[in-house]
Image (spheres, coloured by chain):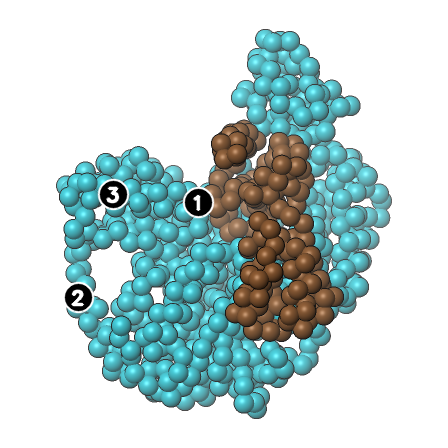
Amino acid sequence: MDFEPSELAETIGRNGTGDSLISVLEEIQARYRYLPQEAMILVSERMGVPLSQVYSVATFYNAFSLVPRGKHTICVCTGTACHVRGAVQVLDRLKSGLGVGPGGTTRDRQFTLETVNCLGCCALGPVVVLDDEYEGQMTTRKVDKLLKHAMHQVGGER
Amino acid sequence: MIELRSPQALVDYRQGIRAAADPLQRRIRVCDGTGCRALGSRKVLARLQETLREAGLAEGIEVAPTGCPGFCELGPLITIDPEKIAYNRVSVDDVPAIVAKTIAQGEIIDGLLFVDPVTGQTIIHDHELPFYTKQIRRVLELNGEIDPTRIEDYVAYDGYAALSKSLWQMTPEQVIEEVKQSGLRGRGGAGFPTGMKWQFCRQSPSDVKYVICNADEGDPGAFMDRSILEGNPHSVVEGMIIGAYAMGATQGYVYIRNEYPLAVQNLKIALKLAREHGLLGKDILGSGFDLDIEIRVGSGAFVCGEETALMASIEGKIGEPRPRPPYPAQSGLWGKPTNINNVKTWANIPLIVRNGSDWFASVGTEKSKGTMIFSLVGKIRNTGLVEVPMGISLGELIYDVGGGIPGGKEFKAAQIGGPSGGCIPKEHLDVSVDYESLKALGAIMGSGGLVVTDEDTCMVDLARYFLEFTQEESCGKCVPCRVGTRAMLETLERICAGQGREGDIEYLIELGQEVKRSSLCALGGTAPNPVLTTIRYFRDEYEAHIYDKKCPAKVCKGLITYKVVAALCTGCMICARNCPVNAIAGEKGQPHVINPEVCTRCGICQSLCNFDAIVAD
């Protein structure tokens, strides 16, 4: 989705000024799956917040990305419970399967690989979340199946 | 919609709800917490509704999504009322039988019941499960009973009665006195007496004051706060309104992680319903007291769980902590007096006001009163959420409630308090779980995360894992935390990679103590705890890594080699085909060989082998 300045005016209007910088950036992130540079410049101008401050907030919080992300997100929980149950191997397998590291996006912009510190469903560890679907008790073998299925679906969408 | 503008209106409303409820109502409760959802509970719920409709039974049978009762290990969980039949690990395929047998004919399906692993006995009712019988469930009592999206359910169980009592029968000072008397201490980890904190805020003169609920539950392996907000959000809302009345605050915030979408959703619904019923907003219950509560969703920064960083984040800034004093009670959010409490602390408040401080203090130890909620995770049989009295022994918590270690493995240590806490080894299994006793062992109570490790867990790797976490999450404002944790992490990484040197252990201890002493906030002030406690109790493992170049638990990649046990290998070639670096050679039907020069120790071959023919050495 391309950045549309007119939508931004509405987002800022709804959130007021100053204190709600994070909320505004969260909305932009949710809409475009990253923070386009033009959007951050506009936020700074329209909200009267120095661009340096917008940038500092955008880079401080993990939820924001400054580079475009894939259409689908594959998120590996690396919380303690998942870690002691083998999340490292699951992540390794996804890295080699997708050819990108955590935070990376596949060249076709379909998948972004991410890690999260804990999703709080520790009974299911290791957990992988594909978009909104939770997959529990993951193994390298289940990763292969998941990837195959996901790539097949993506192929179907094209 | 009923607007409740007097205490009597609330009483009448409650009586109306109770009178309309049929105690023999056939009801199917389906756990709708994140854990069970991930296991497919939504599909089970949908299929139940569909099957009931098809069978012509939908009329008069309620299918209710509830919060998390805690036994995540056995999810998806369903409970059938009025008998309270507990079925576990229910799949979509079980639904037709449940409807045809249990619902239509009252017949119990043995295969879906819990089987006690010790006695081999099947257990029909959820309250008879050993997992629950050892608990004292107060805050979690209604999780799993009520539909969190219906305010009627909460009100029927005396919900908002404590609020009514506070506003109409107690002065703010009396509320604070009651909380002080109860001995309640902050459940976020530090354990500061809640009543005293409230009094400081009450005594700060200001026209504007704030109350904040800290739901930025960042410790990996902890999900207590999430489950309360998902399963019983009104208890937190009620606690916050009572606190705001006691301290004279007029605005509240709940700061919650963005990783918890369901908790945000249920809390939003709860706030809306409370507002519509005159329990939140202007002139609450006709008392003249005003308070509104807003939600602020965090953006993924662990440090925002620290109170001064949290407030900066609400103000729209980056979440960097600042030195205290001034404490938030004097100068907090936007410079105004502010009180911040954890989700569990707020959820205890209505219970204390309603039942009295003596009731609350009737369980616990001399200095740690009430109950504590833990999430039991890691190498433990009954993964889940438990509420136990303060002062329970760690051994009882892990073995009696948690069911012990699965797979016949041996308990090694419990990590309490997440990245800020420490590990407790088996020689201290008899330690009383309370603030002081845990601190004496180098751990902390923390907010309730309890990760159990067994013989297959490398304690050096675990310390490295936690430090990697805190180092990554350090905001970078103060030098001891920013640079100190990095230096410690580099040392640990070297040790795990097999490049440990003499003096590393002493260096880690010295540096760790310095980081603890001189960091600006609790993140740096507690970050070395996992390292210091693992050195204290498992120094031999560190020494094995450094001097013998061995990882006793066979976890650290730099110190192990993978080998094929020729006698077990069938030559199926799965490992060779899946090795990402082509380090495995061998003909079909013949034992394979791993080339240690090429092998990257990713462990994929071992996880894929069907014959346990690949071992780490």
Front one among A47 and B545: A47
Report if the CB atoms under discs 2 and 1 are less than 8 Å apart. no
Residue type at mark 2: give it.
Ala
The residue tagged 2 is: B20
Do pointers 3 and 2 mark residues of a single chain? yes
Residue B35 visible somewhere in the drawing: yes
Of discs 1 and 3, which sits in the foreground? Answer: 3
Residue B400 visible somewhere in the drawing: no
Q: What residue lies at 78% left-to-right and 23% top-to-bottom?
A: B597
Callout 2 secondary element? helix
For marks 2 and 1 on the same chain, the one whose residue lies earlier in the sequence:
2
Residue type at mark 1: give it.
Ala
Q: Chain of mark 1?
A: B
Q: Chain of mark 2?
A: B
Report if the CB atoms under discs 3 and 2 are less than 8 Å apart. no
Can you tell which mark lies on residue B38?
A: 1
Q: What residue lies at 84% left-to-right and 48% top-to-bottom?
A: B503
Chain B's colour is: cyan
The residue tagged 3 is: B50
Percent x, y of residue B431: 55, 57
Q: What residue lies at 19% left-to-right and 51% top-to-bottom?
A: B61
